Image (cartoon, rainbow, N blue to C red):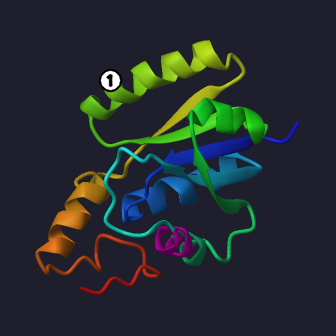
Amino acid sequence: MEKIAVFPGSFDPITRGHESIIRRAVPLFDKIVVAIGQNVEKKVLFPLEKRKTWIEQTFKNEDKISVDVYSGLTVDYCRKMNARFLLRGLRTSADFEFERSIGQVNKKLYPDIETVFLLTTPELTAINSSIVRDVFSHGGDISQLVPDGVVLSQ
């Protein structure tokens, strides 16, 4: 059976932290689906198509990585994709506590799913999409915070 992992998120925008987690996970799985979740209650800064294009551009040379968009429960999407692994990155102990709770509920809803955590590398721990959006919104240079394929303009 193919080892398929889903790496869900809003990716508003994708960061070097996301990129690192995904690239480091490639040897672990046969396929990784970077799944952009649509949540009408979550306010986003960048349009969905732009976020999808940035991710596709970032991983254009990686056959094992695909990009998709979904709505609804992540575990339902995983079931639909025949994915048995949910990939998550952990920056802090607070991330672990939050992700652990979600992972346990996901396991109840979809017993075949396993949540796999990868630790963020130390130099990327401080980076998250909220910080990138804040720096961008205030005219700061975010080039060190996002993958090379992400070109933002004010």
Instruction: State the residue in front, 108 or 50.
Output: 50
Label 1 neighbour load within 10 Å: few <14, some 14-19, many 20+: few
Residue beneath the point at 36% across and 44% down: 41
Q: Position of residue 30 (x, y in %)?
A: 77, 50
**Relative to 62, 129 lies left or right:** left
Which residue appears farthest toward the left when viewing the image? 138
Q: Position of residue 8 (x, y in %)?
A: 53, 46
Q: Position of residue 153 (x, y in %)?
A: 29, 87
Q: Position of residue 109 (x, y in %)?
A: 62, 17
**Relative to 154, 50 lies left or right:** right
- Tell me: residue 60, above or below residue 127: below
Q: Which residue is mark 1?
A: 97
Instruction: State the residue in front, 22 or 24.
Output: 22
Residue 127 seen from this side: no
Secondary structure state at the residue bearing disc 1 = helix
Instruction: State the residue in front, 91 or 102.
Output: 102
Question: Which residues lie in the magenta part?
Answer: 49-54
- Tell me: residue 92, above or below residue 135: above
Quarter of the figure with the C terminus: bottom left
Residue beneath the point at 32% across and 23% down: 97
Residue beneath the point at 47% across and 69% down: 51
Give the residue type that dot 1 points to. Glu
Q: Main secondary structure of the magenta part?
A: helix
Q: Is residue 17 magenta?
A: no
Residue 101 seen from this side: yes
- Tell me: residue 1, above or below residue 43: above
Quarter of the figure with the N terminus: top right
Residue beneath the point at 60% across and 49% down: 70
**Relative to 31, 48 lies left or right:** left
